[in-house]
Amino acid sequence: MSSYRWAALLLVGCATPIPSIDAGFDAGPATADASVELDAGPTCLALETVDLDQADAGRAFLLGAGAGGDFVPRLAFDNLWRVWGTGQPADFAAAARARYGFSEALSFNDGLPMGLQLSGNQVRADCLVCHAGVVAGQTVIGAPNNQLDLELLIDDLKALAMLAGFPAPNTPTVRTGARGVSDIIGMTLQLGLRQGAPPFPVNTEIGFQDPPAWWALATKTRVYTDGSAPQSGHRTFMATQLAFGTTQAQLEALEPSYLQLRQYLLTLEPPAWPFAAPDTAAVERGRTIFRAQCTSCHRDDRCERMTSVEVAQATVGTDSERAAKYGENEVALINGTWFGAADPHRATGSYLVPSLRGVWASAPYLHNGSVPTLTAMLDSTQRPRFFKLRGTARADYDDVNVGLKVEVFTAAPANPTRADRAAVYDTARPGLGNGGHLFGDALTTDQRADLVQFLKTL
């Protein structure tokens, strides 16, 4: 039962982009191109050339359970239901997916969900827990898991340990603001402080965010919600290994495998729009609007890759907590370690503009997942203040407004059960605000509809 000690620490890996082991929707490899100046003005960057042999080795590293580590004994995992207060379910695997928001595995996987693997009598974990989402009824590797409740999972593991007569594990605080939206960076900083406290205060509540879409990495030059790190960096992707007691010598030995894993990540492509093809004329009208109104920040659709843009929080107006709290002290903590030494982080006070590659499959929107559809992104009057994602089935995807169907509430439910505490998204909570990005409000209804049609094609 000693593996409980790492029950929450592994979740640092949800900040780690790890590529697919399979695909619910087929995706081809990214290819290199040449930099070119387009007639309309945008300067495109070449995609990074991918070494396919190295990418294959990275895939083998992941499939061979080389990344991550032991999470919890299989016996303990299979007995989590004992702390649910609902009795033993007829189908534990399905009940666990529903309770914690796990995505269904693409193969049998010993009855475990995506992100968990059986190794002897231990359940190992990797970042597919967070970075494999169910989109329109299909598990998609690289899509954000918008159902995951990390805080509930760790609370249940603690309760089970105590029920079995063991003390609650000493884990960092796990904060889930709403399903799929957690303070992963704050938890990472807590783990960093365990390696040695610096002589200055460090925030460990940084703000809620949902996982980024992995397939966008190849199109960017900066990463993380605030653009704090260069896209070429890989060591902070390895921070998950600390959750399993990896020593410095072991980290250095694993580094070549993580470099290969990064190569594999660069081959990811977004899934194709799976519903009825958008209207061709509307797409062309939307393309014109996009190039005229959106490409000063977002990647031009004529470019595979462009220099990433960071927009000051005061300009974009979205929830300020994440941009404000990952500051100079937090950056100094990371840069003072092996993880930040080669590719230092920087405090930006800004938000990284997404490239919108495969944007249809990455709902909900904004860095904290507070807006359920692209239509609501482009019309702030349509953003619900309190809502619950309806589900993950194909019928629960909103192919008209592009995003997720929701149940809207007039207020946050009072006294929800523990399992339902994070089910309703409360945009009144700090870190979960749905304001800002008002740039679409000036468009007409028809212009917004055309733009949404175009965004289905990216």
Image (cartoon, rainbow, N blue to C red):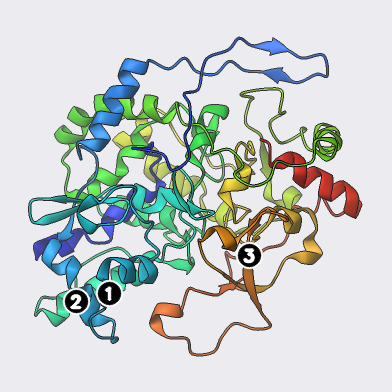
Q: Residue at x 54, y 54 (%)?
A: 136
Where is 259 relative to 416, above or below?
A: above
Question: Observer-nearest residue: 435 or 89?
Answer: 89
Label for residue 113?
Answer: none
* x and y, in percent, of residue 12 in the image: 34, 51
Q: Which residue is mark 1?
A: 156
Say if residue 442 shows up in the picture.
Answer: no
Q: Residue at x 49, y 30 (%)?
A: 230
Q: Residues within 10 Å of mark 1 (few under 14, many from 20)?
A: some
Please tell me which of labels 3 and 1 falls first in the chain: 1
Identify the image quadrant of the N terminus: bottom left
Contact between labelled residues 1 and 2, with CB atoms less than 8 Å apart: yes
Where is 5 relative to 365, above or below?
A: below
Q: Is residue 425 left or right of residue 110?
A: right
The amino acid beneath tag 1 is Asp
Q: Residues within 10 Å of mark 3 (few under 14, many from 20)?
A: many
Q: Which residue is mark 2?
A: 160
Identify the image quadrant of the C terminus: top right
Q: Which residue is mark 3?
A: 405
Query: Where on the picture, by quarter, is residue 42?
Result: top right
